[in-house]
Image (cartoon, coloured by chain):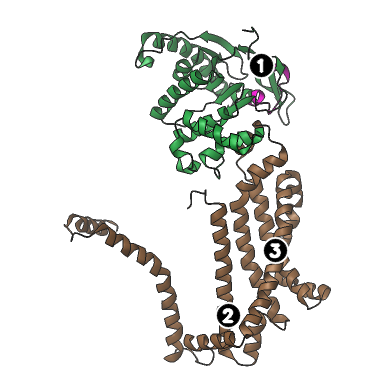
Chain colours: A green, B brown
Amino acid sequence: MSTQPKLRLRNVTKQFEIRGEKDKFTAVEDISIDVAAGKFLVLVGPSGCGKSTLLDLLGGLSSPTSGEILLDGVPVTGPGLDRGIVFQQYALLPWRTARKNIEFGLEAKGLPASERKQRAEHYLELVGLQAFADRYPHELSGGMKQRVAIARSLAFDPEVLLMDEPFAALDAQTRESLQDELLRIWQATGKTILFITHGIDEALYLGQRVAVLTSRPGRIKKIVDVDIDRSGEDVRSSSGFREQRHHIWSLLHDEVRRAQTEEVSHV
Amino acid sequence: MSSPPAVLDAEVIARPSEPEPAGGRRLRTFTWRLLRPVVVIALFLAVWETAPRIGLVDKVFLPPFSQVVRAWFTLLGNGQLWEHVSASLSRALAGFALAILVSIPLGAAIGWYRPVADFLNPILELFRNTAALALLPVFVLILGIGETSKVALVVYASAFPILLNTISGVRTVDPLLIKSARSLGLSPIRLFQKVVLPAAVPTIFTGLRMAAASSILVLIAAEMVGAKAGLGYLITASQLNFQIPNMYAGIVTIALVGVVFNGILVAIEGRLSGWRTTN
């Protein structure tokens, strides 16, 4: 086992120019965090914590103003198939069936048709959607769409799976079952996952570690190691879960309040 | 206002109705859906047939539909109809095809490079709003009264709907799809081919259908002004020779050509964008 983390963010700062103003807007500031291979890290933060900025940086769609992002020790310089992104709004191509959507990333990878088909089949099975392989996205429920999106991102075998509030648009029941599904898939594939959310329960239920972010600019306030026994029934109601939930809630609550007062003072 | 019918409906539902096989009802709704458009057309034709006969309109200026049908079959029999239809169709299709070849790539390029689109937009708006027929004399002056000026006019008239719709189709692709494809590391060309173009297909087809309609419109008008064959020529020539049934036969043919043209485009569109929720 190497000691090198899978994903490392080193003092990552991103600033944007604001038109007509001299000051730059700092979206995220001095973020440093390591994710070891096969670990599940959740970032939780109030709105304005710079999560989209962070995701663009991780995806290689923009580059940090200072600091660097390392994947297996190599700096990220652009988008690539070593990272798979799952978006909140699924981002499925509406003119492709579930199967063809999964094959999309494989086409980008340049795999031959027969192998694409085989892999798509495998990942359809992994997310339990073989029966819906030839449906178009508009014929699928929100939960099914997100499963397809997850399968698509896993199919090209990325080093890291980046998930941007993937379950935020789903109803509560579907969300819970997809959370369980994700944990199962994570255990089955051994992927390194970085998951962004607003929800404390979700963060706690999924993550091995939860990083709480501040708002405006986004900084890391605290990283909490989650220690919950997930084997019992209704884990979310256990006393251990409640305690840790309250801990993260109070960390986050200060931030939410600060963000609100700032917003009011801006107006 | 709405409450009495609601009560009535409730009564109808509440009353134990005659046991009706579900298949029978389905068959009835199916036949009705099939018949409904036919009924309206038949009604219209019946009015056309009877109005001149009972003297509501002058028989000479609006002959009954049956007479027009007879004239139509005579024209079909002696080959005149085909001569005119093929003359018009070859002009329309040539112009339409040229417009597609020019407008779709051009529109895609303009739409993809936003600054180009913003830069060209005023001139495109200006040309688009210049009625093609107003330019007919210009085309005739420059290209003569032969085939070239007519085909050129069709190109002009159908190029703009296709161009503008292609531009807007390419510009309004869901940014998330582009972002997601970019995050996969797709090259700009592949991104265009695999994401932008398929996403723009429905909008482009709206443009194609608008273009088909306007290409026939300007062509007929151009043929009315100066041509020796074509449906527009058939109509004006028949009118001048006082062969009124023939004139109406030409008009009916134009309507049929338009409907068929549109139908073909709708069918192709259905095949290419069957993934849309509207189906």
Measure how far apart labels 2 and 3 are at the Cα level.
24 Å
Q: Is B65 situated above or below A73?
A: below
Could you tell whether A130 is left or right of B119 in the image?
A: left
Q: Chain letter of disc 2?
A: B
Q: Residue furthest left?
A: B16
Of badges 2 and 3, the one in the foreground is 3
Are discs 1 and 2 less than 8 Å apart at CB? no
User: What is the secondary structure assignment of the residue under circle 2?
Assistant: helix
The residue at which mark 2 appears reads as: B251
The number of numbered badges drawn on the structure is 3
Give the residue displayed 53% in from the left and 38% down from the top: A99
Measure how far apart labels 1 and 3 are at the Cα level.
56 Å
Of badges 1 and 2, the one in the foreground is 2
What span is colored magenta in the figure?
A56-70
Place of residue B217 in the rendered image (x, y in percent of width and height, measured from the top left): 64, 72
Place of residue A220 in the rendered image (x, y in percent of width and height, measured from the top left): 59, 13
Please name whichever residue, B250 or B23, is drawn nearer the observer in this view of the structure. B23
Place of residue B55 in the rendered image (x, y in percent of width and height, measured from the top left): 44, 92
Measure how far apart labels 1 and 2 are at the Cα level.
72 Å
